[in-house]
Amino acid sequence: MISSNTYDVLVVGGGLAGASTAYALAQRSLKVLLCESEPRLASKASGNAWALLMPYVATQSSPPGRLYAKGFNFTHNLLTSTFEGLVSYHEVGAIQLPATKRLSRILTETVPFVGNSPIRRVSAQEGSDRAGVTLLTASFFIPQAGYCKPARIAEHLATSFPSHISISLGRSIEDLRWIDSKWSALFNDGSANSFTNVVLCGAHDIQKLPLTSWVPLEAIRGQTTQTVMTPSSSGLRTVISYDGYITPQQEGLHFIGAHYRHDDFDTEPKDLDTQEILARLYRTLPDISDLKVASSRVCFRASTHDRMPYIGALPNNDGPNLFINAGHGSRGLLTAPLGGEIIARLIGGQPLDNLSEAAGICSSGRLSTRMTRLIPPS
Ligand SMILES: Cc1cc2nc3c(=O)[nH]c(=O)nc-3n(C[C@H](O)[C@H](O)[C@H](O)COP(=O)(O)OP(=O)(O)OC[C@H]3O[C@@H](n4cnc5c(N)ncnc54)[C@H](O)[C@@H]3O)c2cc1C
């Protein structure tokens, strides 16, 4: 039984965003109930076997570039300093191939920008030497990039302050109502409890709550594949990002992603999609062929109308202290932990300081104009 007086904050959703938010709140001695509808934390988008921590290659002038650089540094510091040795971050470096027109232009014309992290243009030969497989073109080399297990990070974040974070698994929030100056949360087992602050970290499932069904979040299907290492792939030493990505082997398996599909809600992996993922890889890395698929997995990214996450106070007609940390798309490792820190500063009444620009770019205030259009006045 949960007492309404026990918690300062209800965090809805136990993926990377929810676990990061709970962690940042607990760092400020706030008591948190972290509620996850699945039996395990991080079992949806945050449950892939591996995820890349990979900065976004941009030009210095771009707001997304500065946001993602801040997010990369924040998460990199978390993994290599705060959680050093506790979560396995394989900082093997990444080769970013110029797979889009935008990247080709930056490769040839402008100064690449990934914030404070080093980045270098490398020739096809130097890239091949670093990667351990033949590359056909020049590329960027980013030494601080790498890959990690997102679920392990979420679990570590959520369990770091057991005296301040209570985890409720297998229970979902079905409804939120502003009653007697508090948010009353209705659980799927029929119980209800009230909270002063609520943070919605449920990705696109936020739309299932009647109060927030209007929030524009799109579920985009992604399929990933693990393949058994072969002699042709065993030399791979860095992550390679192209119009897909591959990691070096861990325990004899490579992780290869990721399919990106709108309007497809099939939760089962499809052979055709696996073939497409592998075809892209074979086209890019001619040394590698005939990989044997060990397993495939489907999950869904929550994407927003402008691709930036929603982080901050959520405009609504009912009550204050409702927050959102969601819509992290394909770059959750860059933005979800940063989002947790921003939310915790807002709830804790602290200045945003060095995170002001990032908070502005992700501000959920940009939803307010949409809200007035989508919700009829009561
Ligand atoms: C195929 C694929 C590959 C990706 N690869 C990378 C990568 O390499 N690098 C990277 O940075 N990012 C990557 N991403 C993106 C990253 O995985 C996501 O951005 C991140 O996991 C989102 O975290 P989240 O907590 O917002 O969402 P989720 O992990 O989906 O968590 C939301 C949680 O909320 C719970 N929930 C929802 N509603 C309720 C409710 N009412 N009550 C209780 N619980 C609720 C859900 O059960 C779920 O567990 C990838 C995404 C996909 C799909």
Image (cartoon, rainbow, N blue to C red):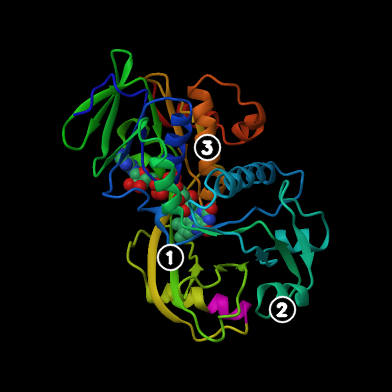
Q: Is residue 317 above or below residue 89?
A: above
Which quarter shows the C terminus?
A: top left
Which quarter shows the N terminus?
A: top left
Q: Is residue 197 above or below residue 85?
A: above
Earlier-in-chain disc, 3 versus 2: 2
Earlier-in-chain disc, 1 versus 2: 2
Q: Indicate yes or no: mark 1 CB to ligand 1 under 8 Å.
A: yes
Distance, label 1 to label 2, CA atoms, is 26 Å
Determine the residue positioned at 41% across, 53% down: 151
Q: Indicate yes or no: mark 2 CB to ligand 1 under 8 Å.
A: no
Query: Label 2 amino acid?
Result: Leu
Question: What are the residue bounds of the magenta stretch?
Answer: 279-285
Query: Label 3 amino acid?
Result: Gly
Asked if the magenta segment contains residue 363, the reply would be no
Depth check: 66 or 1 in front? 1
Query: Label 1 amino acid?
Result: Gln
- Residue 200 pos. (x, y %): 40, 35
Q: Secondary structure at mark 1?
A: strand
Circle 2 is placed at which residue position?
136
Distance, label 3 to label 1, CA atoms, is 25 Å
Determine the residue positioned at 50% across, 77% down: 278
Badge 3 vs badge 2, beta-carbon distance below 8 Å: no
Circle 3 is placed at which residue position?
339
Circle 1 is placed at which residue position?
223
Q: Is residue 310 visible?
A: yes
Determine the residue positioned at 77% across, 61% down: 120
Mark 1 surroundings within 10 Å by alpha-carbon count, few (fewer than 14), some (14 through 19), many (20 or more) = many
Q: Is residue 90 above or below residue 9?
A: below
Determine the residue positioned at 50% across, 70% down: 256
- Residue 183 pos. (x, y %): 32, 22
Earlier-in-chain disc, 3 versus 1: 1
